[in-house]
Image (cartoon, rainbow, N blue to C red):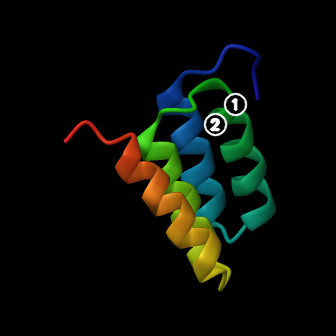
Amino acid sequence: MGILRTLEQTLEDAERCLDEGDFSGAEKTLRKGLRRWKASSELWTLAGEVAYEQGNAKEGVSSFREALVHSKV
């Protein structure tokens, strides 16, 4: 992973990890992304999906709520 990543690249990397069942890789990518783009509803939504896929509904709901807070809708 390069130093200067775009939000889109970060999302693609995290989604690829999730698709491959690499939850640890997805979480690591999302943590790094959220440090840089704290207000990204897309990153928060994907973080919720990762948590939910691992059976952590409480963390998933928390992430989905953050996504709503940062949503531009």
Q: Is residue 65 above or below residue 10?
A: below
User: Where is residue 39 shown, x and y percent of the image?
Assistant: 48, 32
The residue that appears at 69% across and 55% down in the rendered structure is 26
Could one spot residue 19 in this view of the protein? Answer: no
How busy is the neighbourhood of tag 1: few (under 14 within 10 Å), some, or many (20 plus)?
A: few
Residues at marks 2 and 1, CA–CA distance in whole angstroms: 4 Å
Q: Nearer the viewer, residue 3 or 34?
A: 34
Query: Seen from this angle, which residue lies furthest bottom?
Result: 55
Q: Residues within 10 Å of mark 2 (few under 14, many from 20)?
A: some
Up the image or down, 8 lies above or below 19; here it is above
Circle 2/circle 1 CB separation < 8 Å? yes
Q: What is the x, y in percent for residue 54?
A: 68, 80
- The three-letter amino acid code for the residue at tag 2 is Leu
Q: Position of residue 60 (x, y in %)?
A: 56, 70
Any mark on residue 35, and which? 1
Q: Residue at x 74, y 65 (%)?
A: 22
The extreme top residue here reads 4
Q: Which residue is mark 2?
A: 34
Of the 4 image quadrants, the one containing the C terminus is top left
Q: Pick the quarter of the image with the N terminus.
A: top right
Q: Is residue 25 visible to us here?
A: yes
Mark drawn on residue 26: none
Above or below for 22 versus 58: above
Look at 61% across and 77% down and name the residue there: 58
Q: Residue furthest left?
A: 73
User: Secondary structure under badge 2?
Assistant: helix
Q: Is residue 42 left or right of residue 33?
A: left
- In this orientation, which residue lies closer to the viewer: 36 or 9? 36
